Image (spheres, rainbow, N blue to C red):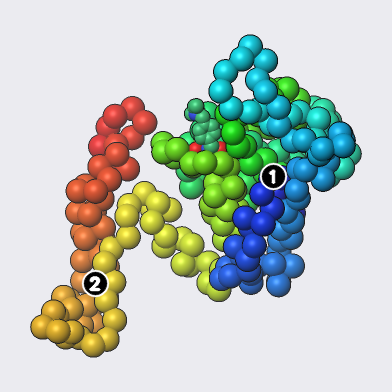
Amino acid sequence: MKIDVLTIFPEFFGQVFDFGIIRRAKLAGLVEVNVHDIREYATDKHKMTDDRPFGGGDGMVLKAEPIFLAIEHLLGTSDRSEYSESVRVVMLSPQGRPLKQQIAKEFAECAGHIVLICGRYEGIDERVNEMLVTDEISIGDYVLSGGEPAAVVLTDAIVRLLPEALGSQTSAENDSFSNGLLDCPHYTRPAEFRGMSVPEVLLNGNHAEIEKWRFEKALEKTKRIRPDLLIGENGEM
Ligand code: 9D3
């Protein structure tokens, strides 16, 4: 898989892809991640990447041309109907579909080349969305100052799902959300720490009882913190 990030702040990404699972996946040749400065595709003498909005208003809008030129350089076309089947051009924006584990899974399974466009300012020229973008994604209902942190989040969520990116596939299957529940509590040695003891059931070696305890704790925690995860799309429990 290849992931290209388009941003006006390339330095933001410094070493963010050089740790843990993403680092290992890169070293194993499972993924290549490259960050590109949109400014390098600006054609005017001041290398302008943004301009004032038509119709007036506060703030600046990212210009279409540098982003079209960057996509043409990376994909050979600026017409999304000509993209290969495995190409995704993702706009990170507050207007996007909220990111879910299922979306990361679909990208990990079906995408071979992903271009992430990081929005900024008051927005981006709409012709970028009309001609280049295949998916518009938000990472949640809160305001960021740009799409860069969202690009990191999405990259992490996708790369760790690539086959063989994790040491053992079982840990991906045991993740929160893959069974629709939050994770159960965990403990390690010592069995008593500053007067706080580990639940007895985890120490007795009865694996059927341990699995039952873990499921009950996960269900109890999900009901309390995230009851929305237990309700189906049609409102049933
Ligand atoms: C003035 C109205 N705002 C739109 C809701 C403007 C605005 C806010 C934040 C424009 C851009 C941004 C920057 N945010 C992102 O680019 C972004 C984002 C986010 O703010 N929240 C959750 N996911 C994402 S993905 C990209």
Q: Label 1, on which residue?
A: 8
Observer able to see residue 97: no
Observer able to see residue 115: yes
Q: Please identify the quarter of the rendering in which residue 90 is found.
A: top right
Q: Say above or below: 196 vs 95.
A: below
Badge 2 amino acid: Ile
Tag 1 secondary structure: loop
Q: Quadrant of the C terminus?
A: top left
**Residue 231: image x %, image y %?**
29, 37
Ligand 1: does it lie within 8 Å of the C-beta at label 2?
A: no
Q: Residue at x 19, y 48 (%)?
A: 224
Q: Residue at x 32, y 43 (%)?
A: 229
**Residue 96: image x %, image y %?**
54, 32
Q: Say above or below: 43 vs 159.
A: above
Badge 1 amino acid: Ile
The 10 Å Cα crowd at callout 2, few under 14, some 14 to 19, many 20 or more, is: some
**Residue 197: image x %, image y %?**
14, 80
